[in-house]
Amino acid sequence: MTVAIGDCAPDFSLADVDGFSHALAQHRGKKVMLSFYRFAACPLCNYAIDELKGRYKKLAWAANLDVIAVFQSPTESIEQFILKSRDMTKTEFPFTLLSDPEQKTYAQYKVGRSRIGRVRGVANACRSKECRFYARKHSREHGNKIEGPVDRLPSDFLIDEDGVIVDCFRARAINEHIPLDRINSFLLGEKSKRSLRNVHPEEIKKESSARNKWRKISQKALVGVSS
């Protein structure tokens, strides 16, 4: 069954670059962008990371969003190709980087694969002079160590403070990620208003039910802590 808008985001626990366990539940109460990438050395993934990182630092809403990037690579590869290639440490990097070489969360979130999507993504990248130059330079300087399926399609999930998925983007090509305007709408609280016009009433009912479920869970947890 596909994970969709209105669902409670499935919790998970993965290792960060230091090997420490990191759970999605740790971000409860914050708005989260959960993004699934291919392997850490992937030139197109690194291009997308730098694009988002550049905008993230410039935009005022950055402090209101926790970005979690999941890779199908082991922790040492993430450290090498994402952090060391940029001369950055884990604390300096603005996003949480997680490793899932067994791809359990990819299966949990139904992150897809497509040979056609791989061909389409390479063709799209070749049409962009900037992306083509970046990819060649990155591969030449850092290599192109493939880990996991090369036909993995990126997916992005926008999750609200209650742990409910309010928007999701499933790429049809390996170079695609969620448009910036949808992230802006999510942070400004406009997504739910747009959903009321475009989503079937049953989906709205489903989202409301999911929110109530998480509120009850949170209340029980608080009672347990206080006692």
Image: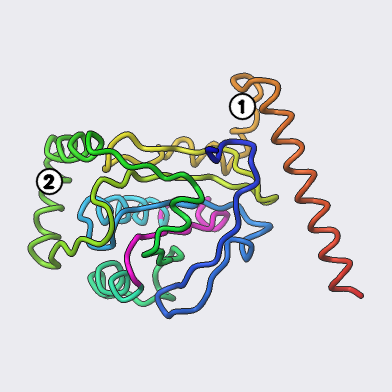
The reply, left or right, for residue 138 in relation to residue 161 is left
Looking at the rendered structure, which numbered label has been put on residue 195? 1
Of mark 2 and mark 1, the one earlier in the sequence is 2
Q: Position of residue 44 (x, y in %)?
A: 23, 50
Secondary structure category for the residue under label 2: helix
Task: Let me know if residue 67 is in the magenta part.
Answer: yes
Identify the mark at residue 132; answer none if there is no mark: 2
Q: Are marks 2 and 1 in contact (CB under 8 Å)?
A: no
Q: Residue at x 53, y 58 (%)?
A: 66
Query: Vertical placement of 149 versus 169: above or below?
Result: below
Q: Which residues are magenta?
A: 58-74
Residue 140 or residue 214, whichever sits in front:
214
Callout 2 crowding tier (Cα within 10 Å): few <14, some 14–19, many ≥20: some
How far apart, in angstroms, are the residues tagged by discs 2 and 1? 36 Å
Secondary element at image label 1: helix
Q: Quadrant of residue 204?
A: top right
* Quadrant of res 154: top left
Q: Does the stretch in magenta take in 145? A: no
Q: Quadrant of the C terminus?
A: bottom right
Quadrant of the snapshot with the N terminus: top right
Compared across the picture, whether 227 is left or right of 28 comes to: right
Amino acid found under the numbered disc labelled 1: Ser
> In this picture, is 184 found above or below 150?
above
Q: Is residue 1 left or right of residue 101?
A: right
Q: Which mark is residue 37?
A: none
- What type is the residue that disc 2 sits on? Arg
Residue sitting nearer the eye, 89 or 107: 107
